[in-house]
Image: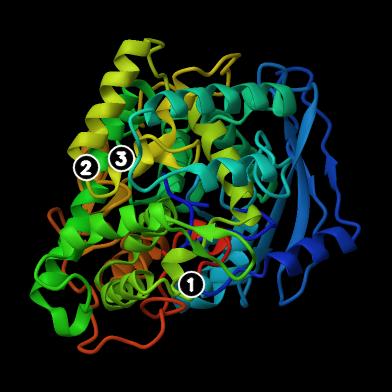
């Protein structure tokens, strides 16, 4: 899962390591386009029918990084047929004689660029990881430079988002269903040849071919948010090929793939719970928050309605309303307590109709590059029942149980995770690249699962469930607000580093409780990042660089 906005920019987009630095998407795009980087496909093994292992022709792409392209099967049922080209990047360990192998980094989403993720976050990785591994990433099929999926074009998205409300009206559910059907049809019309093949089973099979292309006997991997689900599926398919897997901000894979309504409900509750805890903090700490006086919850509800009734003109000629506010909070709340004073200031500015508030930045066309594959991948992965009555009951219940942010998301246009049911329950066509289990990964090496107790995006209970479903899973708990643990907790970061480098598994029951607390005084501007070295969700930067970071 991984969620979008704080906002992607045009080169790719959604769910990056907490912010290890800004991804220079444009520079990477130019580097990939400006060099004759081609993947020379190896000859297929005609005896086994196995797909050919890509041959990677590396070329310099600035800053010490190397880029290449890799041709992999479009459809693994026809492993020697049509191919799709994946953009890949790496930075080699300084001492090749001492390196332990290659570390795959996988951002969240679905929809975030792995190329940008590596380039933007490499410098903030612990030195032990940079010294021990070549660091590798790639744009998964359907994302960014790897045949970007586009269903709705920019004008269609802009129109739908401009019409959405923070406090939806009585006809909002019917409108959401109509928009879901329209998005489905657009995907069929504009991405029909690709969409059956963007599911996570094929993504995992791509990783195994890339592992072989890099000469690695086993996989060493860090995946956050939706990247954790990709790693889970890889382990299920290839348990003996696991060296070390970190699954941070983990999914309950059985619910995600096969019981998606059971997956959606906790997400709504986790998001609204995090927003509620922030507003409760505001009430108790008015000197640091400054929003809402004696009743921040009532003030927030009023602000949504006021912005709907009187949208705020933006600098680029658009408007921001209550839906804009909800959309931005959906992603920025992922930053945890460290951002709470800045959220309070941004809400005060929104009350004053000050369009410099980062919560009043409508999604830009850059965001849509993330959102299109975000929806398409999950509609292929998830098996929603095709029952209109059940759909309505589930969506309306989610909106009721999560009153702060839920109604705007449940009844909004096709965007991030929360809006997927009204689209995916109507999805048509093949879903041959979907994986439905088992998720045991029987016989694998130990797999490290990280869960954050106050995670608004991937609920903590999902990490607990995954650790129990895996035959050899080990859970590390981070007691904190915010999305994911690595990079936001020195305790968790050290544990992850020791596990990836030396395969040292944390003791059972290990709990970290070192979240960075809110500053004692409210900063005058929203932070451009959070804690030092935080590996943040790619969706934040991608979705038009909303001014802070936070699927």
Q: How is the image coloured?
A: rainbow
In the depicted structure, whether residue 195 falls above or below residue 308: above
Read off the residue under disc 1: 355
Q: Sequence order check: which comes first, mark 2 or mark 3? A: 2
Is the residue under label 1 in contact with that under label 3 (CB below 8 Å)? no
Along the viewing direction, whichever of 40 and 97 lies nearer the viewer:
40
Disc nearer the start of the sequence (1/2): 1
Q: Is residue 216 visible?
A: no
Q: Could you tell whether 155 is left or right of 291 in the image?
A: right
Q: CA distance from mark 3 to mark 1?
A: 24 Å
The quarter of the image holding the N terminus is: top left
* SS at mark 2 in the image: loop
In front: 125, or 27? Answer: 27
| Residue 236 image position (x, y, % from top left) | 41, 31
Q: Which mark is residue 402?
A: 2
Position of residue 406 relative to residue 543, above or below, is: above
Label 2: how many residues lie within 10 Å, few (<14), some (14-19) or many (20+)?
many
**Label annotation for residue 407:** 3
Question: Residue 31 appears in which quarter of the rendering?
Answer: bottom right
Residue 118 x %, y %: 59, 64
């Amino acid at each position: 899962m991984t969620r979008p906005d704080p906002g992607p920019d045009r080169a790719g987009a959604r769910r990056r390591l907490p912010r290890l630095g800004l991804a220079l998407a444009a520079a990477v795009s130019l580097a990939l386009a400006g060099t004759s980087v081609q993947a020379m496909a190896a000859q297929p093994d005609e005896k086994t029918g196995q797909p050919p292992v890509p041959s990677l022709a590396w070329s310099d792409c600035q800053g010490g990084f190397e880029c290449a392209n890799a041709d992999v099967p479009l459809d693994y049922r026809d492993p020697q047929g049509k191919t799709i080209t994946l953009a890949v990047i790496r930075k080699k360990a300084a001492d090749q004689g001492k390196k332990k192998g290659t570390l795959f980094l996988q951002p969240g989403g679905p929809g975030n660029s792995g190329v940008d993720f590596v380039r933007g976050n490499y410098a903030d990785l612990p030195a032990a990881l940079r010294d021990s591994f070549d660091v590798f990433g790639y744009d998964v099929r359907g994302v960014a430079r790897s045949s970007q999926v586009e269903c709705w074009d920019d004008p269609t998205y802009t129109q739908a988002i401009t019409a959405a409300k923070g406090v939806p009206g009585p006809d909002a559910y019917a409108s959401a269903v109509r928009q879901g059907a329209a998005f489905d049809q657009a995907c069929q019309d504009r991405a029909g040849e690709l969409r059956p093949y963007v599911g996570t089973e094929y993504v995992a099979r791509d990783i195994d071919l890339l592992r072989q292309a890099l000469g690695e006997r086993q996989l060493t991997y860090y995946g956050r948010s939706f990247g954790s689900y990709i790693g889970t599926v890889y382990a299920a398919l290839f348990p003996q090929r696991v060296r070390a897997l970190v699954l941070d901000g983990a999914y309950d894979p059985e619910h995600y793939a096969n019981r998606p309504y059971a997956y959606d409900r906790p997400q709504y509750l986790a998001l609204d719970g995090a927003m509620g805890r922030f507003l409760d903090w505001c009430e108790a700490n008015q000197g640091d928050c400054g929003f809402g006086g004696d009743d921040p919850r009532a003030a927030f509800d009023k602000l949504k309605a006021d912005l709907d009734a009187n949208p705020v003109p933006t600098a680029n000629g658009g408007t921001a309303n209550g839906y804009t506010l909800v959309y931005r909070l959906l992603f920025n709340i992922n930053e945890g307590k460290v951002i709470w004073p800045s959220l309070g200031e941004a809400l005060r500015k929104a009350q004053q109709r000050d369009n410099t508030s980062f919560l009043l930045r409508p999604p830009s066309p850059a965001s849509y590059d993330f959102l299109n594959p975000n929806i398409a991948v999950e509609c292929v992965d998830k098996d929603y029942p095709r029952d209109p009555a059940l759909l309505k009951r589930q969506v309306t219940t989610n909106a009721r149980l999560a009153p702060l942010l839920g109604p705007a998301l449940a009844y909004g246009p096709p965007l991030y995770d929360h809006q997927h049911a009204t689209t995916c329950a109507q999805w048509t066509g093949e879903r041959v690249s979907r994986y439905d289990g088992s998720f045991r990964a029987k016989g694998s090496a130990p797999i490290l699962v990280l869960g954050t107790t106050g995670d608004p995006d991937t609920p903590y209970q999902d990490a607990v469930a995954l650790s129990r479903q895996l035959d050899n899973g080990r859970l590390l708990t981070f007691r904190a607000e915010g999305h994911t643990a690595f990079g936001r907790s020195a305790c968790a970061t050290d544990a992850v580093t020791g596990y990836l480098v030396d395969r040292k598994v944390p003791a059972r029951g290990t709990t970290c409780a070192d979240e960075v607390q809110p500053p004692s005084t409210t900063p005058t501007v929203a932070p451009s990042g959070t804690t030092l070295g935080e590996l943040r969700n790619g969706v934040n930067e991608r979705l038009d660089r909303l001014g802070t970071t936070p699927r």
